[in-house]
Amino acid sequence: MVRWYTHLVLIHTSSSMLRQLSARNCTASALLASSRRTSSICSGPPRIRRTLARRWSSSASLTAPNSEQEDAASVAAIRNIGILAHIDAGKTTTTERMLFYSGAIRRMGEVHDGDATMDFLPQERERGITIGAAAISFPWRKHHINLIDTPGHVDFTIEVERAVRVLDGAVAVLDGVAGVEAQTETVWEQADRYQVPRVAFVNKLDREGASFARCCESIEARFGVQTLCVQLPVGEEAEFAGLLDLVDMQLVKWADKEGEQVQRLPLLPSAGGKMAELYGKAVEGRQTLIERASNFDDELGELFLMEEEIDNETLKAALRRITVQRGMASQVVVTLCGSALKNKGVQPLLDAVVDYLPSPLDLSPFEAHTVEGGKKTRGRGPGSEHKVVQLKPSSSEPLCALAFKVQHDRQRGLVVFFRVYSGVLNAKSQLINSSRGGTKERLTRLMHVAADDQEAVEFISAGHIGAAVGLKHTFTGDTLVSAKDAAHQMVLPGVQIPKPVFTCSIEAESSAKQKDLDAALENLQREDPSFVVTVDEETGQTLMSGMGELHLDIIKERLRSDYKLEPSVGAMRVAYLESVTNSVELPYTHDVMLGTDRHFAKLTVSVDPLLEHQEDSQDENEDEKEDGNNSNVVHWKNQGAKKMPHAFALAIEEGLRAGLSRGVLTPNRVAYVKVTMDEADCEWDSDSSAASFRAAAALALKEALREAGPAILEPTMKLEVRSPERCVGDVLADLSSQRRAHIQEVGSALGGEGGESVANQGRSIVHANVPLAHMVGYATLLRSKTQGEASFAMQFLRYVEVDPATRDRLTGNLRKAPPKQFEASSSDD
């Protein structure tokens, strides 16, 4: 009885302290951290600490700062991080341990048991994989960590893309046995694109064949970076027992099965026996760390050259300066190690997040562009006159937030996830969507996010991540500002949407269900911009396109489970595109009589190919408009030369979009084309109208596309096959002769100077570029050829022009005869 009474007193007293901390704008995580180290009033059992952590986490962004200093201190304590990895590298398991040790959850869930906190979708729990990015907040060492767990499968790369867009830092999790894998490269490139600082965590060091040294070599070889190893493992595989902390010169061990009791033993030169051996290894590793780090930090380099003694805090400060610099992750990365499943290494990883990854203050100011009056002007993106604005993560700044995800909730409707870059977002406030021409929005509910649990709050301040209900016109990548700033709006850089590469038809089970299916598909498109639904103009068929077979399989499952629909889905086929190979300038006059009405418009259309620059087409000049799905660019010259009516200019753009929606050889969309319009060449009279210019633009563009050497494009993939050596010959023969693959390299699994691991002995990796059309059903065929011992992973590489045989087949009869390679592949299923 005394024990339970004491616990109740602890909760009551700790709640009072929590209120006092809030009144002083202090983080309650200080209380939690100290309770682990001292015998304070909060030294109760772990579940008491976790109760406080959950209560603090939901209230951390609700305390208004009393001064600029307090505001800055609060933002400096924020870490917006993401967990990035190849599938099955252990990122969700790592996240689960982070939540448990911070006190955010009561018990650790497991991916293989289907009860992981962050994998809450039924499809995720059934398949044991992460499908959607999920956000959660928790405290650690007086800091507030907003964490986004992302999928590791290439089909869900949009989830990584939009998460990385709003992150300040990331943890790249790698399999200690496999090293860098195909999707590891993809997520690393995404993080590089947004210049996200990161640390690497080599996981699964308890597994047979694990090697920290070889994994580091793999990182250096595949990414061209230097690893700064701040830890070394004590033992590997079954002997993995702990870590050597090379910064604080400590042996780190875990005394209990759940990994809550962390033991830190100092490494001293006076130690004997095993500790003396570990001390020598740590000294050597620390020296290597300092030598490498000194190449990237002037202060540390100067001390190193002068052979000055470098203390722990000096080294830690240098490592932080290196890591927080934007773009530095493409040169060097702080590297840690552990085994999340065995509950080893996660607390030091959390320490590294706090010590080395940046806060919003470290990366500020953030750039946005002004949009005067929110008026959308032709050919100039969201506004006609825009200049760069520097945003500071301060509550006193004007509100500017970025919507990075939209999710449909059956009870709440559309839920928009956002990050506040400056200012404060208040509940029930009126907003302006400056990415959509100043559309007005009214927020009805504001929420703190914890995976699938969302708690209402009054406001969310700068630097934090939250969710909102009531934003009916907001999409992924949109910028939200306060309605008070309607005359001086800002637009943040949006989210890059990957292009879908697989397509299949879909049909409602009955005409009575058609409206329900249309509504469901609209919701799914709103949630996932990489999922595209179109209607074939000739057949009237509804077509849905996605990033891969698994992606569209999940869509089908969600239609059945979430929307209770049973649609018929056609065979999977590759999403071909059309483009042009030459440049053409075409004057066009539209002068027709419709009944008694004359319709007149005159213009000149120029088209240029962008296929050879498709990797760069995502970063076109701000003055040019880009179609996110097709990578087409519309550019205006001599704007204002003739003072063309705004309605005519918008009609021209509508006509161009219509012309680009369907090719001249096949029904596929047109892509990688730059269309230039010159206002000086446009003419109109009293018989001209918006409809005249819309028709003229569409017809002129079709003619120009025909004259510009139209070409059919197919997606090619970067393929990685891991196979037993005895099967490599069969794998290579199949890829070369049946799948038009270009073999790039064949090597040993993981490889490097350290040689092969035990688990990888007798295994090889095949790297190849292959047309996606030949990879439908490849998983079944590969299992058959290798007795289930091989695996493969793909990532989108680029679009290329099809070979003559494929072109003839596609232009001959695209729908009546499925591609031969599809028949061959599908027969294996």
Image: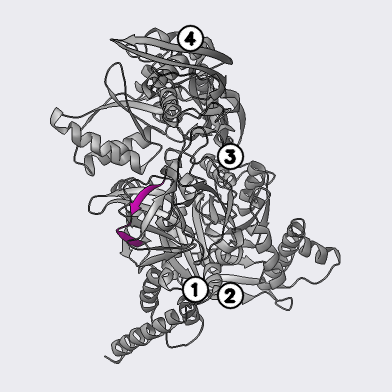
Q: Earlier in the sequence, mark 4 or mark 3?
A: 3
Residue drawn at (77%, 64%), measured in percent from left and top? 300
Does the magenta-highlighted stretch encompass residue 446?
A: yes
Does the magenta-highlighted stretch encompass residue 388?
A: no
Residue range highlighted in magenta? 438-447
Cα gap from disc 4 to disc 3, whole angstroms = 36 Å
Residue bearing the label numbered 4: 805
Cα gap from disc 4 to disc 2, whole angstroms = 66 Å
Q: Amino acid at mark 1?
A: Ala
776 and 726: which is toward the camera: 776
Instruction: Determine which of the numbered discs, if any, sits on residue 264 in the image.
Output: 2
Instruction: Determine which of the numbered discs, if any, sits on residue 749 in the image.
Output: 3
Cα gap from disc 3 to disc 1, whole angstroms = 34 Å
> With respect to residue 177, does 306 lie above or below?
below
- What secondary structure characterizes most of the magenta part? strand
Few, some or many residues within 10 Å of mark 3 (<14, 14–19, 20+): many
Secondary structure of residue under mark 2: strand
Secondary structure of residue under mark 1: loop
> With respect to residue 274, does 18 lie above or below?
below
Q: Earlier in the sequence, mark 3 or mark 1?
A: 1
